[in-house]
Image (cartoon, rainbow, N blue to C red):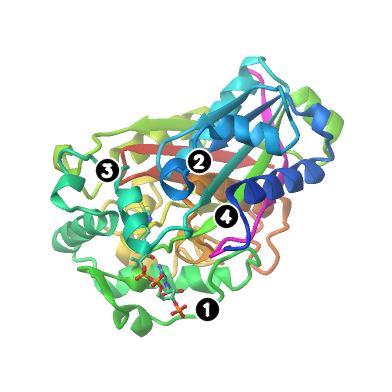
């Protein structure tokens, strides 16, 4: 396998962007990434685009062709990748495999979602298509509801508290204050989270990621091209991908996301490192409990200790392992198909020392992207 580098990044602001279409967003991110990589349209050989549900959110499918058409890369191969909220992370992995195998030398990886054109009820229904229709959605389960069950069991088994969950949201809102692309620039306190509207007991409004529009893109290159084009490439040193039962009831223990454990194992083995070597990580905090499970399943603390580990400040910038320096899904926003690519961009900015106001001086960074309640997990490790 050949070495693969990230040589350019670009993202739109995340939020309720009613003046921009799905294509506007995708093209803006893609053009920014190509400019950052200092490449022309003619240099791009292939596109991988992650998006969850153009059909349900904006009545648009056949996204692969749409992306190459509107970004001006007509006639090159373009592949749409779908794995619910892990679509962006999986698009990165597919492009990595493509370039590592020697098929192409330069790829643009994009992630995009336009979720706010339809009402809240329709969004919840569209997102629930990523859960099992037969066993979960049919009975009225939604993603806040499914993650609430995980939270309840975690609290019961490990004495995790609502305050500890809230601390993830408080930290991520604080980090987002320094991210100009974040949806929310609003400092909150633990009491704000605890007093916010109940969504699905014990998860309240501020325990949830929001509904968002946005896009993100990165340019991947083979070692030879990266050295020609870029002074400071960021290398993909580990890539992992695993799946698990789609429904919670089919899992051994719903407080462990086995897909995360397996994907992380693959990435650590490939990168020849362990959790102690990671300098910062973007984890999939679609709900605060998801951040707690992720830091345990990725090996930063023992199973059951995620709440206390967070309370002790270990996941703050300056702590043992800074988590979600971008603001995470909670405060940066969660346009589902774009999330995995945006997490990758934060890792790249951290390694380049360009995460202004939130730099960690990390030498090695990680991203962790989940589809649904853990049916898919993608983990990547990056180094300078
Ligand atoms: N965090 C913080 N503030 C939020 C928020 C969130 N998650 N969601 C909405 N808000 C704010 C809005 O900005 C708005 O503030 P304003 O009145 O100052 O403008 C207010 O809350 C009401 O917004 P609204 O859009 O009416 O909220 P809602 O009740 O329709 O939606 C949720 C709230 C939690 C249900 C929705 O954000 C949601 O479904 N989140 C989960 C998304 C999800 O499941 N993703 C996939 C994960 S696997």
Q: Residue 187 location, x and y as percent?
A: 51, 80
Q: State left or right for residue 83 relative to residue 324.
A: left
Q: Which residues fall within the magenta stretch?
A: 1-17
Label 4 – label 2 distance at C-alpha: 16 Å
Image coordinates for residue 6, horizontal then vertical, percent: 69, 37
Name the residue: 18% across, 66% down. 159
| For marks 2 and 1 on the same chain, the one whose residue lies earlier in the sequence | 2
Q: Quadrant of the C terminus?
A: top right
Are there few (<14), some (14-19), or many (20+) residues within 10 Å of tag 3?
many
Q: Is mark 1 within 8 Å of ligand 1?
A: yes
Dot placed on the residue nearer the N-terminal end, 1 or 3 = 3
- Say whether disc 2 or disc 3 marks the residue closer to the N-terminus: 2
Picture layout, residue 38 above or below residue 119: above
Dot 4, crowdedness within 10 Å: few (<14), some or many (≥20)? many
Task: Specify the quadrant of the image occupied by residue 313.
Answer: bottom left
Between disc 4 and disc 2, whose residue precedes?
2
| Circle nearer the N terminus (4, 3) | 3
Label number found at residue 214: 4
Image position of 321 with respect to 98: above or below:
below
Front in this rendered view, residue 294 or 288: 288
Q: Which mark is residue 131?
A: 3
Asked if residue 272 shows in the view, the reply is no
Q: Which residue is mark 2?
A: 60
- Nearest to viewer (mark 1 / mark 3): 3
Image depth: mark 4 or mark 2 in front? 2
């Amino acid at each position: 396998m050949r070495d693969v580098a990230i040589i350019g990044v670009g993202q739109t602001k995340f939020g309720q962007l009613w003046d921009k279409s799905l294509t506007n967003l995708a093209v803006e991110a893609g053009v920014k990434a190509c400019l950052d990589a200092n490449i022309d349209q003619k240099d791009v050989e292939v596109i991988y685009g992650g998006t969850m549900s153009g059909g349900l959110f904006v009545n648009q499918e056949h996204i692969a062709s749409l992306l190459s058409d509107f970004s001006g890369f007509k006639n090159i191969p373009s592949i749409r990748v779908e794995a619910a909220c892990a679509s962006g992370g999986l698009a990165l992995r597919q492009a990595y495999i493509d370039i590592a195998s020697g098929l192409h030398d330069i790829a643009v990886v994009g992630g995009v979602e336009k979720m706010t054109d339809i009402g809240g009820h329709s969004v919840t229904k569209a997102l629930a298509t990523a859960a099992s229709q037969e066993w979960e959605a049919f009975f009225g389960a939604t993603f806040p509801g499914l993650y609430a069950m995980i939270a309840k069991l975690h609290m019961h088994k490990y004495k995790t508290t609502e305050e500890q969950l809230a601390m993830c949201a408080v930290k991520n809102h604080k980090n987002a204050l320094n991210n100009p692309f974040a949806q929310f620039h609003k400092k909150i306190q633990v009491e704000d989270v605890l007093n916010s509207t109940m969504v699905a007991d014990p998860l309240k409004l501020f325990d949830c990621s929001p509904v968002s529009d946005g896009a993100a893109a990165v340019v991947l290159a083979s070692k030879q091209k990266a050295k020609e084009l870029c002074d400071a490439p960021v290398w993909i040193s580990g890539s992992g991908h695993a799946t698990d039962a789609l429904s919670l009831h089919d899992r051994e223990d719903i407080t462990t996301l086995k897909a995360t454990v397996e994907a992380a194992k693959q990435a650590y083995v490939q990168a020849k490192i362990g959790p102690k070597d990671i300098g910062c990580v973007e984890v999939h905090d679609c709900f605060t409990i998801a951040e707690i499970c992720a830091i345990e399943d990725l090996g930063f603390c023992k199973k059951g200790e995620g709440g206390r580990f967070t309370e002790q400040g270990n996941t703050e910038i300056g702590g043992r392992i800074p988590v979600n320096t971008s603001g995470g899904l909670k405060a940066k926003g969660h346009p589902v198909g774009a999330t995995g690519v945006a997490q990758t961009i934060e890792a790249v900015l951290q390694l380049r020392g360009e995460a202004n106001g939130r730099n960690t001086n990390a030498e090695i960074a990680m991203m962790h992207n989940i589809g649904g309640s853990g049916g898919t997990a993608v983990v990547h490790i990056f180094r300078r």
